[in-house]
Amino acid sequence: MDFRFDIIVEYAPFLLKGTLLTIGLSIAGILIGTVFGLFIGLGKMLQNKLLAFPFTVYITFFRGTPLFVQILLVHFGVVPFLIGETNAIYAAIIALSLNSAAYIAEIFRAGIESIDKGQMEAARSLGMNHVQAMWHVILPQAFKRMIPPLGNEFIVLIKESSLAAVITAPEIMYWGRAMAGQYYKVWEPYLAAAVIYLILTISLSFLLNRLERRLKTE
Amino acid sequence: MIKVQNLKKSFGDNEVLKDINLSIEPQEVVVVIGPSGSGKSTLLRCINLLESITGGHILIEDKDITDKKNDINKMREEVGMVFQHFNLFPHKTVIENLMLAPTKVRKVSSVEARKKGMELLQKVGLEEKANAYPSSLSGGQKQRVAIARALAMEPKIMLFDEPTSALDPEVVGEVLEVMKQLAKEGMTMVVVTHEMGFAREVGDRVIFMDGGYIVEENEPKQLFESPQHERTQAFLSKIL
Ligand SMILES: Nc1ncnc2c1ncn2[C@@H]1O[C@H](COP(=O)(O)OP(=O)(O)OP(=O)(O)O)[C@@H](O)[C@H]1O
Ligand SMILES: [Mg+2]
């Protein structure tokens, strides 16, 4: 078996573009997912069970079905319904954000619930209302505890964004598959893609470890 | 100043406060004692509206705080609370702990809040810890900060729920000293405590609670030396 580095070199510019898109998709997914996830997590924690129910359904749906199915639903259903035609990059961002929001909602809930009840009581006893207490007392503390699982979710997103290849969003795996199709080769494209993903995830966990250590000593 | 009328509080089927009637005068220091589970903490938490009550009324300066029409947060500002486990905000420095509520709730400028905060820290003897984080303080220091934090909102009444029972014995004194000072300055106080020395010295009245009722109340000397009820006698014989 001869390993053809030359085709990897030939595809390098495309793989680089694909890498940028993968990074873009995951960053968009984690950012939108975080904002949306906070909202859903708070919704699920509502005292009123009836009001909390839709949020619980949301979380159950997005955690209980494969991301692959969600991407197809968004690509062929939701996006055409919204803008009349489909668009792979929009669809990928929407599906990844909706999916990560469900996981991040649970991360938020766990983070908030891990804060001692006395914190909320102390804040309330000082005359703060619920929103002020949440914003100034509970969330800043909870956020620190959420950073490791949020980082983990980010890593998951980088890997799972590869599923966007099937709806032709030109990220890493899209170009990997294109390379495989053109040269009828297996090892070169997929190993190249694997190495790129590894570089991304290992650098990210390195950064997260440093961040965590910084926060711990604070 | 505070009137509690026919107060009832249940958790599910468990009726914890059965029929509490209590009246506290301005500048009075009332000490609450009683066995574990008798409802002492629950009573304080009801007065501060940290628990929703099941029945009865609580009036603070003739305003019914249990009336839904009154703003709960406004009512809470009038009542300071000090907890057994301090509940300082660990992500904020000592002075920030004191400044948070005045700036966010009262909209006091941060310059003014800091000035007031430093005065209060001086009062509890901790001005040199203003920029420290709570985790670096001893238990006694934490509780003194917690008292200063409650005072920063200029409450009319201070509630203390076993403020010294989570402390090492050697730092109990410094916290009691701050409380005594506060009493001397005329603060109205309700204190749940097992510190009988404090009750005798500072308390104007001692209330003995058991099983969700106020069993007996009297001046400290009388209550400790000649308790009228059997249950009070039994309790006192165990702790004195
Ligand atoms: N949030 C709650 N939910 C259910 N039951 C509760 C709750 N808080 C208190 N109780 C119950 O109410 C009763 C009285 O509790 P409370 O904390 O007021 O007693 P206490 O007199 O302060 O006791 P201690 O000396 O141990 O602090 C106990 O039986 C307790 O189990
Ligand atoms: Mg108690």
Image (cartoon, rainbow, N blue to C red):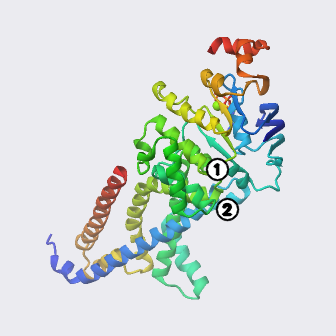
Q: CA distance from mark 1 to mark 2?
A: 42 Å
Residue neighbourhood size for the residue with mark 1, other residues' Cα within 10 Å, grouped as few (<14), some (14–19), many (≥20):
some
Residue sitting farthest toward the bottom? A84
Q: Name the subunit of mark 2.
A: A
Residue A169: where, in percent of width, then height? 41, 80
Q: Secondary structure at mark 1?
A: loop
In the rendered structure, the residue with mark 1 lies on which chain?
A: B
Ligand 2 image-quadrant field: top right
**Residue A74 vs residue B25: left or right?**
left
* Front in this rendered view, residue A28 or B6: B6
Q: Which of pointers 1 and 2 indicates the residue nearer the eye?
A: 1
Residue B154 bears which disc, if any? 1
As shown in the figure, which amino acid type bears the numbered disc 2? Pro
Location of the C terminus of chain B (image quadrant): top right
Q: Nearer the viewer, residue A200 or B127?
A: B127
Q: Residue furthest front?
A: B185
* Left or right: B68 in relation to B221: right
| Mark identifier at residue A54 | 2
Establish whether ligand 1 lies closer than 8 Å to the Cβ of label 2: no
Q: Is residue A67 above or below residue B217?
A: below
Residue in the image at 42% along x and 57% along y:
A147
Please tell me which residue is depicted at 19% across the width and 80% down the height of the picture. A9
On the image, which quarter does residue B207 sit in?
Answer: top right
Question: What's the residue at 68%, 58% (across, down)?
Answer: A53
- Badge 1 residue CB within 8 Å of ligand 2: no
In the rendered image, residue A82, in percent from the top left (x then y), is placed at 60, 83
Kindly tell me whether residue A190 is visible in this rendering: yes
